[in-house]
Image (tube, helix red, strand yellow):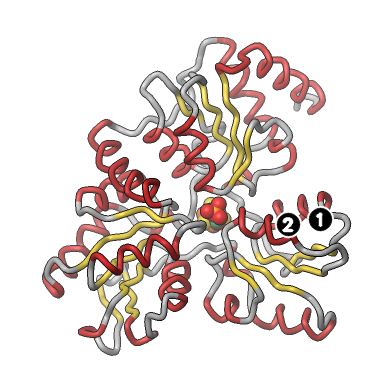
């Protein structure tokens, strides 16, 4: 019930008191009320790199979702604490794959295809999945480097097992010239592989998706194109493939921002990603006509769990000494293998 102005003032004061000992990072989908305090904003790749490069801050307040905070913990030093202002801020897509399900799938695929297969996991996955992938000499991928990483992996192994976002996996595979008949779908709820030609498979996708990016469709794009024939449509690669094909550009949150930044003044651009970010871009780039591809789409409810009261509470705890509250710690064994898979990616990026 506290006055938000008081919370804002207190957060600023506490940040100042900690100085360089505290780093506050925010994903692009965070609300403006959080982004205003960020030392760095970014997509998940940039946030992972920012965390790993900072050796000074002992407290890293991570305004994003749980898997991102886990990744930051894995990539930072032991003396650095990564704090998630609301530990229930997860990712519904990451929750679609657990280690038991992945092991079951892997055992089936290994039996079917031998060892000429590599597991690849989107960074939107738990540390346990990344660790599984690291143990099997696989790699992590983000939306910002998917094409490069998948192309690299396809040179190493004949087949890839891509988790948990089927859309990022399919969009990337098709972009790299993989035929749709060479793409299969693993259904974790029934432990079945859906494929017309199982022997021809090059990429096996996990049946996972992002509920936010499923809210965009081709009808919305067609309506906008008929109303504004010169409009540009840009979308995140977690959107379905028909949506990506109907768009002018596809890219990570960082790539979408840079598209808008570089577009000539006056360009009308509709954006298919989290609406918190699109509304911020509308305010920032007033010389362009930035529109929401789906104005009634929900933004990520899980990201939105991080709000001003949670951040103020987190900062108060830092001062009062209850600093262990909401610290995200990945156990050493899991972190070791997950780091192997992350480092393989970071060395490629
Ligand atoms: P980025 O990698 O583009 O930041 O996307 C992360 C995410 O969760 C998108 O839904
Ligand atoms: Fe996960 Fe989708 Fe939210 Fe991104 S937008 S954190 S993929 S649920």
Image coords of residue 38 (percent x, y): 66, 33
Location of the N terminus by quadrant is top right
Q: CA distance from mark 2 to mark 1?
A: 6 Å
Q: Nearer the viewer, residue 194 or 339?
A: 339
Q: In the image, ligand 1 is in what quadrant?
A: bottom right
Q: Residues within 10 Å of mark 1 (few under 14, many from 20)?
A: some
Q: Tell me the residue that label 1 is attached to.
A: 282
Reply above or below: 195 against 303.
below
Reply above or below: 111 against 44.
below
Image coords of residue 31 (percent x, y): 70, 43
Q: Quadrant of residue 22?
A: top right
Image coords of residue 33 (percent x, y): 74, 37
Instruction: Report the residue at 45% width, 33% height from top.
Output: 52
Q: Quadrant of residue 41?
A: top right
Reply above or below: 238 against 6.
below
Q: How many discs mark residues in the rendered view?
A: 2
Disc 2 + disc 1, Cβ < 8 Å: yes
Instruction: Report the residue at 65% width, 11% height from top.
Output: 17
Q: Is residue 65 left or right of residue 301?
A: left
Secondary structure, mark 2, is helix
Q: Tell me the residue that label 2 is attached to.
A: 278
């Amino acid at each position: 019930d506290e006055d938000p102005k008081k919370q804002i003032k207190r957060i600023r004061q506490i940040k100042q008191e900690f100085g360089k000992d505290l780093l506050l990072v925010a994903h692009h989908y965070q609300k403006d009320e959080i982004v205003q305090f960020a030392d760095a904003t970014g997509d998940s790749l940039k946030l992972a790199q920012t965390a790993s490069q900072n050796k000074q801050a002992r407290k890293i307040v991570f305004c994003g979702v749980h898997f991102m905070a886990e990744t930051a913990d894995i990539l930072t030093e032991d003396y650095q604490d990564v704090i998630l202002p609301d530990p229930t801020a997860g990712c519904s897509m990451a929750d679609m794959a657990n280690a038991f399900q992945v092991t079951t799938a892997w055992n089936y695929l290994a039996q079917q295809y031998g060892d000429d297969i590599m597991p690849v996991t989107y960074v939107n996955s738990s540390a346990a999945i990344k660790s599984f992938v690291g143990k099997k000499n696989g790699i992590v991928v983000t939306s910002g480097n998917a094409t490069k990483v998948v192309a690299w992996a396809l040179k190493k192994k004949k087949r890839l097992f891509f988790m948990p976002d089927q859309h990022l996996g399919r969009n990337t595979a098709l972009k790299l010239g993989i035929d749709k008949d060479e793409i299969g779908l693993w259904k974790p709820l029934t432990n079945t592989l859906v494929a017309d030609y199982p022997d021809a498979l090059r990429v096996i996708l996990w049946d996972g998706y992002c509920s936010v990016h499923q809210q965009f469709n081709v009808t919305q794009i067609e309506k906008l194109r008929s109303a504004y024939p010169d409009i540009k449509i840009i979308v995140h690669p977690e959107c379905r493939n028909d949506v990506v094909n109907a768009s002018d550009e596809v890219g990570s949150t960082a790539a979408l921002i840079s598209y808008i930044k570089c577009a000539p003044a006056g360009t009308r651009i509709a954006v298919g990603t989290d609406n918190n970010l699109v509304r911020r871009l509308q305010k920032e780039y007033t010389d362009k006509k930035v529109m929401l591809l789906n104005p009634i789409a929900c933004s990520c409810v899980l990201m939105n769990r991080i709000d001003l009261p949670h951040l103020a509470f987190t900062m108060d705890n830092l001062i009062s000494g209850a600093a262990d509250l909401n610290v995200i710690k990945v156990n050493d064994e899991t972190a070791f293998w997950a780091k192997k898979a992350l480092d393989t990616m970071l060395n490629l990026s």
